[in-house]
């Protein structure tokens, strides 16, 4: 896909990997629509990204607002389901509200955003949905029962959706990154010493490469492990 002037929706696009990807896509001439629940972060991101970017304040787990935003945005070529939150610890220690919040952002949000944008994606001659899961969506890890459940859920959703859409012009790809240098963990109250984990700008380069592939090629899924470092978990 030639990304110039393509309209690309990025959930959670005002922070971390989403913001790095927004920067990389604007540099390719794409129009980026950032969905974030924080208007202040949106304003900061749009100021930096310039006129090729638009922002919409929405929680992706809230269907009514999300579907209104999708109607406002109109035709779309690419959807990147990137929004997510971290939750870590033993199940018995988790507050049920925190569990619900993780399921809402990481799983319900992916399903809702896909449902909201699918009608317009299906009108494009060539379109692509990329769902950002995690290596924790492929492998269980200590202290990650709830996070892994949401990310395994994204894997199941992605694999099945891919089959449902395989005869259409919509490509579906699961993206499974390992640890990145973002504020994801600190925001959840469980900071990591992650300065030497993967750089989001470099990870964004991989996503741009995936999007640019010709319609004849389907990258089924991409797993991106971080190199083992002193601070690896
Ligand atoms: N960082 C890693 O090591 C790592 C590894 C593997 C996979 N991932 C996944 O990669 C994705 C991006 O994470 P990141 O590291 O870039 O984290 P990040 O910097 O915290 O960015 C995630 C963004 O998603 C937003 N978001 C969360 N729930 C939302 C909702 N319900 N509606 C709208 N926006 C919402 C967050 O907003 P708030 O700030 O308001 O929460 C934030 O802006 C996530 O899905 C994460 O699970 C991250």
Image: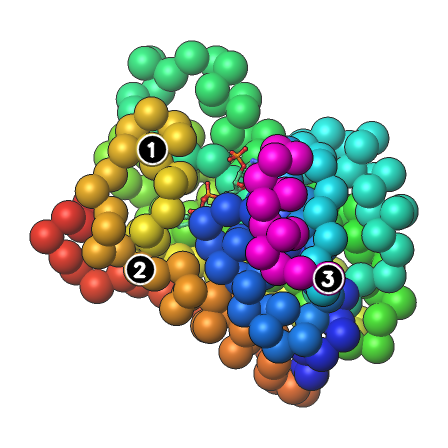
Q: Name the side, left or right, on which 171 lies relative to 191.
A: right
- Front label number (2 vs 3): 3
> Crowding at label 2, few (<14), some or many (≥20) Cα neighbours within 10 Å?
some
Q: Closer to the N terminus: mark 2 or mark 1?
A: 1
Q: Is 40 within the magenta? A: yes
Q: Closer to the N terminus: mark 3 or mark 1?
A: 3
For the magenta stretch, what is the residue range?
Answer: 38-51
Where, by quadrant of the figure, is residue 29 drawn?
bottom right
- Front label number (3 vs 1): 3
The quadrant the N terminus occupies is bottom right
Residue under the image location 15 percent in, 48 percent down? 231
Looking at mark 2, is its residue's CB closer than 8 Å to ligand 1? yes
Using the image as rendered, state which of residue 37 and residue 51 is in the foreground: 51
Q: Which residue is mark 1?
A: 186
Q: Which residue is mark 3?
A: 51
The answer for how far apart the CA atoms under marks 3 and 1 are is 31 Å
């Amino acid at each position: 896909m030639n990304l110039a002037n393509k309209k690309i929706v990025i959930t959670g696009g005002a922070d971390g990997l989403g913001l790095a990807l927004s920067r990389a896509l604007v540099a390719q001439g794409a129009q980026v629509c950032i969905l974030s629940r924080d208007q202040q972060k949106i304003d900061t991101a749009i100021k930096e990204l310039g006129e090729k970017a638009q922002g919409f304040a929405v929680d992706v787990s809230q269907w009514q607002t999300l579907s209104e935003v999708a109607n406002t945005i109109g035709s779309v070529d690419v959807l990147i389901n990137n929004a997510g939150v971290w939750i870590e610890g033993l199940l018995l220690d988790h507050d049920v509200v925190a569990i619900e919040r993780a399921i809402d952002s990481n799983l319900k949000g992916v399903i809702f955003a896909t449902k909201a944008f699918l009608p317009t994606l299906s009108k494009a001659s060539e379109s692509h949905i990329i769902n950002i899961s995690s290596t924790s969506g492929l492998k269980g890890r200590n202290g990650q029962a709830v996070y892994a459940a949401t990310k395994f859920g994204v894997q199941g959703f992605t694999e099945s959706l891919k089959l449902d859409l395989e005869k259409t012009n919509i490509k579906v790809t699961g993206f499974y990154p390992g640890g990145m240098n973002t504020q994801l963990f600190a925001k959840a109250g469980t900071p990591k010493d992650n300065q030497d984990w993967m750089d989001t700008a470099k990870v964004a380069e991989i996503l741009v490469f995936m999007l640019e592939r010709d319609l004849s090629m389907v990258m089924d899924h991409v797993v991106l492990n971080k190199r083992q470092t002193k601070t690896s978990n």
